[in-house]
Amino acid sequence: MKNAIHLKINSIQHIGVPVTNLDASQQFYKRLGFNNVMQAPFTDHGEQGTCVMMQRENILMELYQLPEAGLAEIRSRSNGHIDHVAFDVSDIDETYEIIKEAGFNIIEEAPVFLQFWKNGCKYFNITGPDGERLEFNQVL
């Protein structure tokens, strides 16, 4: 087993959950005390999807609905729908370099900017030994 790398992770930032009906999912999480604190569009294979961040105290759930083409995969899952766990980091570029130097399997070629939150965010993902996605995210 390789040694742990020196990497500053502040906390779990959010848990990403793909949904098939964003309105129904928002209502479900509202009943659990979560509120919509951000909603933004994103592009997936040339079509528009919608991402909603639902928050309750310090817990953040990312609910996102893919365009119609991506929904078939979500509907066919039989053992859960959590897509990724995101870690909050203070310096996304430094984190990317540490992860890259350590030889992890990085999905993106560089941190990706999204116009989420007030000033946007930057993120990248790695895959674990069983294909699980771990996202590193910095809200700018």
Image (cartoon, rainbow, N blue to C red):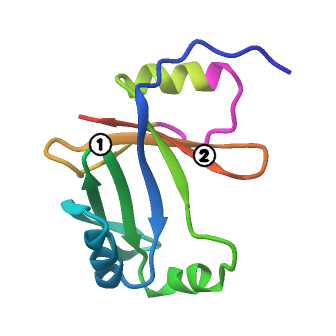
Residue 20: where, in percent of width, then height? Answer: 45, 83
Residue at screen point 62% across, 26% down: 100
In this rendering, position of residue 136 left or right of residue 1: left
* Badge 1 amino acid: Asn
Which residue is most to the right?
1
Residue 106 inside the magenta-drawn segment: yes
Q: Quadrant of residue 91?
A: top left
In this rendering, position of residue 40 left or right of residue 60: left
Residue 18 inside the magenta-drawn segment: no
Q: Mark 2 packing: few (<14 Cα in 10 Å), some, or many (20+)?
A: few
Up-down relation of residue 32 to residue 5 (above or below): below
Q: What residue is shown with label 2?
A: 107
* Badge 2 amino acid: Ile
Q: Nearer the viewer, residue 100 or 116?
A: 116
Residue at screen point 13% across, 45% down: 118
Q: Quadrant of the N terminus?
A: top right
Residue 85: where, in percent of width, then height? Answer: 52, 48
Q: Which residues are magenta?
A: 100-110
Numbered circles on residues, count: 2
Whole-number angstrom distance, CA of label 1 to CA of label 2: 28 Å
Up-down relation of residue 40 to residue 77 (above or below): above
The mark nearer the N terminus, 1 or 2, is: 1
Q: Mark 1 packing: few (<14 Cα in 10 Å), some, or many (20+)?
A: few
Residue at screen point 38% across, 66% down: 63
Residue at screen point 47% across, 65% down: 17
Which residue is most to the left?
118
- State the SS at label 2: loop
Q: What's the mark number on residue 58?
A: 1
Q: Main secondary structure of the magenta part?
A: loop
